[in-house]
C-alpha cells in the first residue's frame, strides 16, 4: 500500500513515488578472499582503464605529439606520457614513525593536514617512474593514485618538465527526464547513542519526514519526499566494545541500545517512505572501502518493510532516471589530509574530474585488494554527488564541457547541526532542512 501523509484536516495526502534502481552491485564483495593479493593489481587495473579514457582525449588535444612511456623518454623531445601520480610527502605518516612514537615519552602532535612545501610528484607507468617538475602541476592539489596525461619533455637532469596536463574530465551523462517536483532527503551523522546527540531533535526529523508533524503546507511538502538516504555514522558505539572480547552485561547494553533505538526510528520511517542506510566510518561495519551493507539482523523492525534498503558505501542508485552517487565521507576526508582546497566541494569536484571516487585508496585510505577491477572508477556522470558526515553544508552546481550538470552536496553531521538536505530531482536544486528543539524548551 502506498505511504500516506496525514494533513491537519485528517485528509490523507498521497506520498509521491519514484522508480528506484539500486546500482550497488559493483561495490558488493560476494566472495572475500585475503590470500596474499597485492595492491599492484588494483593500480594496474586503474591505469589501463584510464588509458581507455585518455587515449582518445590525447589525440584530440595533442594530435601531433607522440605518446611515450617513461622508459622511452628522450632528452629534450616533446611528447605525452600517461601514468599514475605518486606524491612524495615529507609529513606523510609511516608505520615506523607510529612505532617510534609508542616508545617515546613525549607525545608528538599530529597535523590535521600533511601537505608540505617540499612535496613533489612522480609519474609512474608500466615501464618506470619519473620525477615531475614545472609550475603547471601543483603538488598541493593532487594526491597519489590520480591517473593523468602530461605534455612536456625530459630535462637534462632526467626529470620530466610538465608544460600542460590533461585529466580524464567528467564522464558522459544521460540527460534529465524527471518532469515533476520530487525530493530526496540526505542526512548523515545521526550518531544515535552519542552523548552529543539530541533524541528529541532526531524524533522531530522522524516525525517530519513520516508526516506526523507540521501544518498543511509542510505536510504537502513532505508528501513530495520520495526517499531518505542516511549517509553513514548512524550509531555511536565505543570502539573498545567491538574488540572481540567477552562483554560485561553493562557493556552489552551500551552496545545494543543505540542500535535498538535506531531500529525503532527506521521502522517508523520505513513504514512511511523508502529509506536507504549506508555504513560509515563509525558504524558496526567493515573498515575498508567499499563498506558492505549493514546486516539486516541489526534492524529486525525496519527490515520487515520492503521500503528499507541496507546499501553499500559508496552507494549508487537511480530515481526516475536521475543518477545519485555518494559516500559517507571517508574519500573526501582523506583528500583533505593529503591535499589542499578552500572548500570540501572542491575536493568533490576534483574526484569527478579525475573520474575516481577514492584515488588515495589504497595508499592512505583502506580498501579491499581487488585483482581484476577498480570499482571506484566513475564511468557514468551522476546528476547528484553527495558526501556525508561533513562539518557544514556546502553545495555547488558543476557544469561539464559536454553539458553535464552535477549537483554536489556536502551533507552535514546531523548530530551537531540538526540539518538535513533536500534535493529536487527535477531541477537539481537543493536546500537545507534544519530542525531545532529550542522552541520546545520551557
Image (spheres, rainbow, N blue to C red):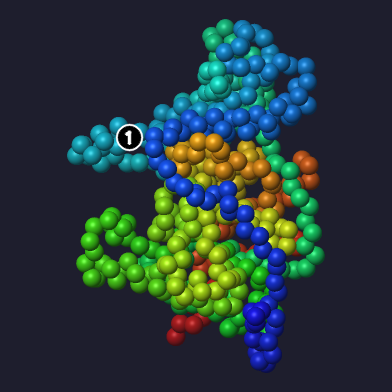
Q: 14 or 122, which lies in front?
A: 14
- Residue 223 figure quarter: bottom right
Q: Quadrant of the C terminus?
A: bottom left
Residue beneath the point at 41% across and 28% down = 90
| In-image side of 39 versus 356 (left or right) | left
Q: 38 or 104, which lies in front?
A: 38
Residue at the farthest front position: 31
Badge 1: residue crowd in 10 Å (few <14, some 14–19, many ≥20): few
Vertical arrangement, residue 402 with respect to residue 295, above or below: above
Q: Quadrant of the N terminus?
A: bottom right
What residue would you read off at disc 1?
A: 95
- Residue 46 figure quarter: top right
The answer to whether any part of residue 117 appears in the image is no
Residue beneath the point at 78% across and 20% down = 63
Vertical arrangement, residue 207 with respect to residue 312, above or below: below
| In-image side of 211 versus 17 (left or right) | left
Vertical arrangement, residue 61 with respect to residue 404, above or below: above
Q: Position of residue 300 (x, y in %)?
A: 44, 73
Q: Position of residue 88 (x, y in %)?
A: 46, 27
Q: Position of residue 357 (x, y in %)?
A: 57, 44
Residue beneath the point at 35% across and 41% down = 110
Amino acid at each position: 500500500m502506498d505511504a500516506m501523509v496525514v494533513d491537519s484536516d485528517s485528509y490523507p495526502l498521497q506520498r509521491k513515488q519514484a522508480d528506484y534502481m539500486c546500482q550497488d552491485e559493483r561495490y558488493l564483495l560476494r566472495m572475500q578472499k585475503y590470500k596474499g593479493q597485492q595492491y599492484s593489481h588494483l593500480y594496474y587495473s586503474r591505469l589501463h582503464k584510464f588509458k581507455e579514457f585518455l587515449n582518445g582525449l590525447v589525440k584530440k588535444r595533442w594530435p601531433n605529439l607522440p605518446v611515450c612511456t617513461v622508459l622511452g623518454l628522450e632528452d629534450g623531445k616533446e611528447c605525452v606520457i600517461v601514468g599514475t601520480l605518486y606524491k612524495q610527502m615529507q609529513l606523510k605518516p609511516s608505520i615506523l614513525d607510529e612505532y617510534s612514537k609508542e616508545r617515546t615519552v613525549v607525545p608528538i602532535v599530529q597535523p590535521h593536514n600533511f601537505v608540505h612545501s617540499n612535496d613533489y610528484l612522480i609519474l609512474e607507468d608500466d615501464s618506470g617512474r619519473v620525477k615531475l617538475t614545472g609550475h603547471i602541476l601543483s603538488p598541493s592539489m593532487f594526491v597519489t593514485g590520480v591517473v593523468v596525461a602530461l605534455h612536456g619533455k625530459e630535462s637534462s637532469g632526467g626529470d620530466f618538465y610538465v608544460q600542460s596536463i590533461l585529466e580524464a574530465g567528467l564522464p558522459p551523462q544521460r540527460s534529465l527526464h524527471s518532469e515533476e517536483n520530487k525530493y530526496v532527503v540526505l542526512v548523515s551523522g545521526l550518531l544515535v547513542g552519542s552523548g552529543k546527540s539530541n533524541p528529541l531533535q532526531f524524533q522531530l526529523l522522524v516525525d517530519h519526514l513520516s508526516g506526523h508533524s507540521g501544518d498543511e503546507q509542510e505536510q504537502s511538502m513532505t508528501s513530495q519526499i520520495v526517499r531518505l538516504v542516511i549517509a553513514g555514522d548512524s550509531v555511536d558505539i565505543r570502539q573498545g566494545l567491538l574488540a572481540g572480547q567477552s562483554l560485561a552485561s553493562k557493556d552489552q547494553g551500551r552496545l545494543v541500545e543505540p542500535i535498538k533505538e535506531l531500529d525503532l526510528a527506521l521502522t517508523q520511517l520505513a513504514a512511511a517512505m523508502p529509506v536507504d542506510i549506508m555504513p560509515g566510518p563509525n558504524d558496526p561495519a567493515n573498515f575498508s572501502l567499499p563498506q558492505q551493507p549493514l546486516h539486516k539482523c541489526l534492524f529486525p523492525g525496519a527490515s520487515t518493510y520492503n521500503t528499507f534498503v541496507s546499501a553499500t558505501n559508496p552507494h549508487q542508485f537511480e530515481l526516475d532516471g536521475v543518477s545519485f552517487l555518494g559516500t559517507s565521507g571517508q574519500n573526501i576526508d582523506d583528500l583533505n589530509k593529503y591535499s589542499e582546497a578552500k572548500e570540501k566541494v572542491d575536493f568533490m569536484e576534483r574526484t569527478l574530474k579525475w573520474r575516481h571516487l577514492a584515488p588515495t585508496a589504497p595508499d592512505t585510505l583502506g580498501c579491499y585488494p581487488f585483482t581484476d577491477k577498480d570499482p571506484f572508477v566513475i564511468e557514468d556522470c551522476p546528476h547528484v554527488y553527495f558526501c556525508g558526515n561533513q562539518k557544514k553544508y556546502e553545495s555547488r552546481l558543476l557544469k561539464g564541457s559536454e553539458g553535464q550538470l552535477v549537483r554536489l552536496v556536502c551533507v552535514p553531521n546531523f548530530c551537531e547541526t540538526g540539518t538535513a538536505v533536500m534535493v529536487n530531482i527535477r531541477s537539481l536544486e537543493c536546500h537545507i532542512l534544519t530542525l531545532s528543539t529550542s522552541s520546545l524548551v520551557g
